[in-house]
Amino acid sequence: MKPTRLTSALVALGALAAAFAIRSAPASAHHSFAAEFDASKPITLKGIVMQIDWTNPHVWFYINVKDEEDGKAIRWALEMGAPHQLQQRGWLRDTMKIGDVVTVAGSLARDGSKRANARTVTTAEGKTLGAASSGDPTTRQ
């Protein structure tokens, strides 16, 4: 059976759509530091680790921080670099565990949400590790 012009056009259109979808996925997953975070707005947070997502392109972890006014826990999302970048700085997958108390220094999200880009993380024992922040000029992809 010989393909028709319509069949050929539909196949070509489908291939183009698939290529676009594949190309768009990584671009939307990775972002510019300056697009999301504000280096001129530093923040230091101390809280209890509630969740860790050790995945590419960025490791995210979530801490509960006690509100100074009413004492209620506020959940913060904190972004670090990629797993391989963290490993180069001495991190292991189990360096930080659920329930650990950590102090995080970083930069606030531009949109005012309870998110920040971590620059350093200090454990309750006083060990400070770089977070491979995308806002740190010494961090390489």
Image (spheres, rainbow, N blue to C red):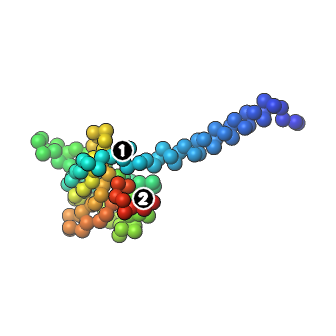
| Identity of the residue drawn at 27% across and 54% down | 106
Quadrant occupied by the C terminus: bottom left
Q: What residue sits right under mark 1 in the picture? A: 36
In the drawing, does residue 121 fall left or right of residue 7? left
The secondary structure type at the circle numbered 2 is loop
Residue placed farthest to the right in the image?
A: 1
Quadrant occupied by the N terminus: top right
Q: What residue sits right under mark 2 in the picture? A: 82
In the drawing, does residue 32 fall left or right of residue 44? right
How far separated are the C-alphas under marks 1 and 2?
16 Å
Q: Amino acid at mark 1?
A: Glu
Q: Position of residue 4 (x, y in %)?
A: 83, 32
Q: Position of residue 135 (x, y in %)?
A: 35, 54
In the drawing, does residue 123 fall left or right of residue 28? left
The secondary structure type at the circle numbered 1 is helix
Is the residue 92 above or below the residue 4 in the image? Answer: below
N-terminal label among 1 and 2: 1
Is the residue 71 above or below the residue 105 in the image? Answer: above
Q: Is residue 84 visible?
A: yes
| Identity of the residue drawn at 73% across and 33% down | 10
Q: Amino acid at mark 2?
A: Ala
| Identity of the residue drawn at 17% across and 48% down | 66
In the drawing, does residue 135 fall left or right of residue 25? left
Label 1 packing within 10 angstroms: few (<14), some (14-19), many (20+): some
Residue 84 or residue 73, whichever sits in front? 84
| Identity of the residue drawn at 36% across and 59% down | 137
Using the image, tell me which numbered label, if any, was put on residue 141. Answer: none
Q: Position of residue 97 (x, y in %)?
A: 30, 61
Q: Is residue 59 visible?
A: no
